[in-house]
Image (tube, grey):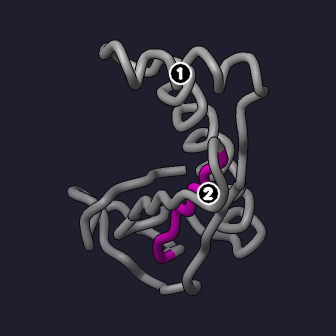
Amino acid sequence: MILVNTETVPGYEITEVKGMVRGNIVQAKNIGKDFVASLRNVIGGEMKEYTELLTESRQMATHRMVEKAKEMDADAVVNVRFVTSQVANGAAELLVYGTAVRLEKK
């Protein structure tokens, strides 16, 4: 599966638009890691707990989007975008979306 954040895929022609696909997840860290991250907020430094949270969330949401595209018999997803929002203290939603398409080599 080809994923791009552009409207086209170099070397390919879009032959069919299958439709919009998305994947999302709401995920939170446990209270211990949330406490450590809040201490880093006071003293400074990277909040690795949240970096890990968003990395895991991005991977899972992307996987879900790709599965939807495969169900639609797509070769690629173009115009891929990520949106992150806080839904609760220590919990974030990550949404990824794009347009599922069929490709043909030029």
- Give the residue at x 55% y 82%: 20
**In screen coordinates, is 43 left or right of 31?**
left
Secondary-structure class at tag 1? helix
Percent position of residue 83, x then y: 44, 62
Q: Position of residue 34 (x, y in %)?
A: 65, 26
Q: Is residue 9 magenta?
A: no
Q: Are marks 2 and 1 in contact (CB under 8 Å)?
A: no
Q: Earlier in the sequence, mark 2 or mark 1?
A: 1
Q: Which residue is mark 2?
A: 93
In this view, the residue in front, 77 or 29, is 29
Query: At 63% from the left edge and 61% from the top edge, which residue is drawn?
Result: 87
Nearer to us in this view, 105 or 40 = 40
What is the distance, in whole Å, between disc 2 and disc 1 at their CAs?
18 Å
**As displayed, is residue 25 above or below residue 49?**
below
Q: Amino acid at mark 1?
A: Ala
Nearer the camera: disc 2 or disc 1 = 1
* Residue 94 is one of the magenta-drawn residues: yes
Q: Main secondary structure of the magenta part?
A: strand
| Horizontal arrangement in the rendering, residue 26 relative to residue 18 (left or right) | right
Residue 55 seen = yes
Residue 31 point in image, percent of width and height: 77, 26
**Which residue is located at x 56 percent, y 21 percent?**
49
Q: Residues within 10 Å of mark 2 (few under 14, many from 20)?
A: some
Residue 43 coordinates in the image, percent (x, y) = 34, 13
